[in-house]
Amino acid sequence: MKGLPDAPRPAGLLPPFTAEHEQLRASLRRFVEAELVPHADAWERERWFPDELFPRMGELGFLGLRYPLEYGGQGGDHLHEAVLAEELSRCRSAGVAAGLGAHISIATPPIWGFGTEDQRQRYVVPAITGERIAALGITEPGAGSDVASLRTRAERVEGGWVVNGEKAFITNGVRADHLVAAVRTGEQDGHGGISFLIIDTDQPGYAASKLDKLGWHASDTALIALQDVFVPQENLLGKAGDGFKLIMANFQWERLAMALGAVAAMQDVFERTLAYAMQRSAFGRPIGRFQAIRHRFAEMATTIEASRSLTYHALRRFHASEDALREVTMAKLLSQRASFEVADACLQIHGGAGYMVEVGIERAVRDARLGPIGGGTDEIMKEILGRSMGL
């Protein structure tokens, strides 16, 4: 329509993506549009999505994109998983994307990166097929961004460990078959004395309750109580006392995946709102023809393109194994707040219709609000950036 900008350009063949990645994108988009989007509303109402999605995605090869063929993976790398993060964010339910993404990008990589061959066979291989669902347990009621304050403790006993404590706000915590949990195994306070244990959730003493939340309704976010839960010695992940290193090792990818997802989510809600502005009329003309609305679309398009450019720059550096701490942190900081603001602007353009549940725009706003909190708050991102400048 004359006077309206085109939607921000899709990723296309922007570096570092290749034709192979775009083939994967097309396959993922077909899956998302055929098997996720049609059910998003129902899963939101039910506040749950079916566990069967995991083996279905395993069957299609989407759970193991960056793992070797001999483990049942697809032999790809982080770029393939980056495409997955983008396309899942178009499913119209951030809860679904979060549950699947937590299993793929947050909970399984630590076992792959630091686990023994036995642990890989017992946990990574069935995670790739979707036979086992994984969750990562770091946050506690009194320890969020301040990881050094975690209090869940594991005491040595014959043959392993006994764990007592609580974990909070754990995605997949109710449905998970195993929890990759940060625990305190030493007497030292702070970052020292933290270890990781792989906890099978069918063990006596493991109890998880589902939390209600503003958004992400289809995902199970859990409060987990661990009371005298036995964990065998062979489920110690990495070395005792090295847990803080494991936490930091996965943070960059988690934050980069969040940035990728936020950009894709912005793109989706923008496109839906642009289509609405072209067909909704007021005072005898489409609302997109009014200058105030045109200018708002121009601002959003610029925000999305800037967020995408910074995020892809961080991805290129990360993929090249360069020090991408500053770029990843900036991408996470910019994209999460921007995603919420773009969704809110789209709701405003929809007017009263945007406030209605059946339209789905209000869900985009609620879902986006977690971004500036999860994976490290905006305030933590700013602190990291400030310290990286020597301040």
Image: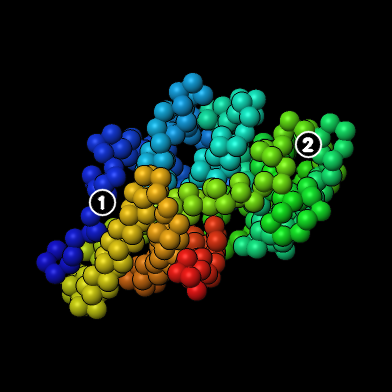
Q: Within 10 Å of the Cα at label 2, are there few (<14), some (14-19), or many (20+) other Cα atoms?
A: many
Give the vertical position of 38 relative to 274 (above or below).
above
For the N terminus, give its image quadrant.
Answer: bottom left
**Real-space Cα distance between discs 2 and 1?**
47 Å
Residue 169: where, in percent of width, then height? 65, 56
Q: Which residue is mark 1?
A: 10
Mark positioned earlier in the residue sequence (2 or 1):
1
Query: Which amino acid type is marked by label 2?
Result: Val
Q: Which label is found at residue 143?
A: none
In-image side of 390 versus 201 (left or right): left
Residue 118: where, in percent of width, then height? 65, 25
Give the vertical position of 293 relative to 336 (above or below).
below
In which quadrant of the rendered view does residue 365 lie?
bottom left
Disc 1 is placed on an element classified as: loop
Between tags 2 and 1, which lies in front? 2
Q: How many marks?
A: 2
Residue 121: where, in percent of width, then height? 61, 25
Image point (50%, 74%), residue name: 391
Q: Which residue is mark 2?
A: 231
Query: Which amino acid type is marked by label 1?
Result: Pro
